[in-house]
Image (cartoon, helix red, strand yellow):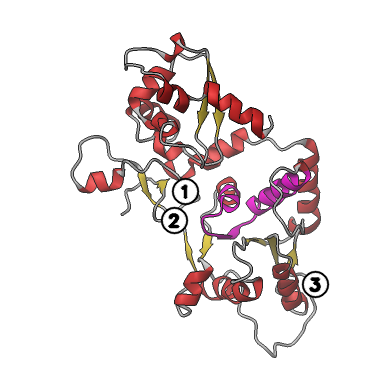
Amino acid sequence: MDRVKSREFKEVFSLGNLLKNQNQNQNQKLADVTSLLQLDLSTEYNDYDKLFYRDETQELVKNVPWLVLKSNQYFLPYLFLLPCFRTELDQLFPDKEIVFHHLARYLFNPSNQAWGRITRFYDAYLARAEQRIGLQIRVLDPENYPPSFILPHILRCIQDESRILPRLQRNEATTSRIGTSKAVFIASLFTEFYSELKDMYWTRPIADVYRASHERNQESYSNSHNMNALVDIYLLSMCDFLVTTQVSTFGYVAFGLAGVSPWFLKDPRDYERNPSEPACHRAVSPEPCFQFHPTDYDPIAALHRGAAGPAPVIMYCEDAIWGFKLANMMSF
């Protein structure tokens, strides 16, 4: 569906527009008005679309036979706040910190072509390593914070904070590379990270450095580009340790699929403001963050105020303090 048709479809069938344009009372069923609804839960949704996250709206929606869901974000954490979903979700997912992992493993099905590329690359370059380390690096502002600015902080993260790789000595003697036990897989639109790290470790028997794609620009509407991205995500998910860019949904899917708590690289502006602070920090779980949630209700703040109801099984996100993520224990 192209963008024009998508807009026309939303005008006619979206839940938000129906709630906005029709003067419905709470006892009227949407099934009496339409047999098809679009639920727009994308990052671009409006306040009327967000009414989906209310119990009273669910009463209107539940009898509509056809629902078309549009979303580019992980909104499930908010459904745990709705009484109409909570009991069943608790039964389905007793461990709240691996919900995305189970859903992604069940629902994601790469094409044969994509899976063939994934398995061939893994078997050829990653399978024999004793430890696989994945680096997902997103550069949002290359003019002000180019790869040359970010790379030293990545090295601080993997060598000092996480200690995934040992610190290299400047005059370290070169020895045979036979039997290197670590493989570093890099996913980034910027090839500088791969080139620098490969050159750095080429003469040391510590790690081999690999990449599967090398595209400079993101092309979201290109199928070939999206397949390259999917291959990178799955290869990252096969790593034992992950270092990802904070607030990156690309990284969210990778560590969620892996079921591995990642190390988050900080915003480059933080490095500039506080150069002596740690370069990265560890997430408490592999659950992704729901960043663009309805802002009219903060369940954690409500709990502080002593609001009644079941305790929300969410916490503020480590990498995006305005967002929520699922958690087994409340964390403030």
Residue beneath the point at 74% across and 55% down: 127
Near-viewer residue (123 or 88): 88
**Main structural element of the magenta stretch: helix, strand or loop?**
helix
**Label 3 belongs to which residue?**
178
**Label 2 belongs to which residue?**
320
Report the amino acid beneath label 3.
Answer: Ile
Magenta segment: 224-253
Occupied quadrant, residue 227: top right
2 or 1: tag closer to the N-terminus? 1
Question: Within 10 angstroms of label 2, few (less than 14), some, or many (20 or more) residues?
Answer: some
**Label 1 belongs to which residue?**
289
Report the amino acid beneath label 1.
Answer: Cys
Coordinates of residue 238 in the picture (x, y in percent): 66, 51
Label 3 residue SS:
loop
Q: Are marks 1 and 3 in contact (CB under 8 Å)?
A: no
Q: Are marks 2 and 3 in contact (CB under 8 Å)?
A: no
1 or 3: tag closer to the N-terminus? 3
Image disc number at residue 24: none
Residue extending farthest to the left is 306
Question: Within 10 angstroms of label 3, few (less than 14), some, or many (20 or more) residues?
Answer: few
Q: Is residue 51 above or below residue 316?
A: above
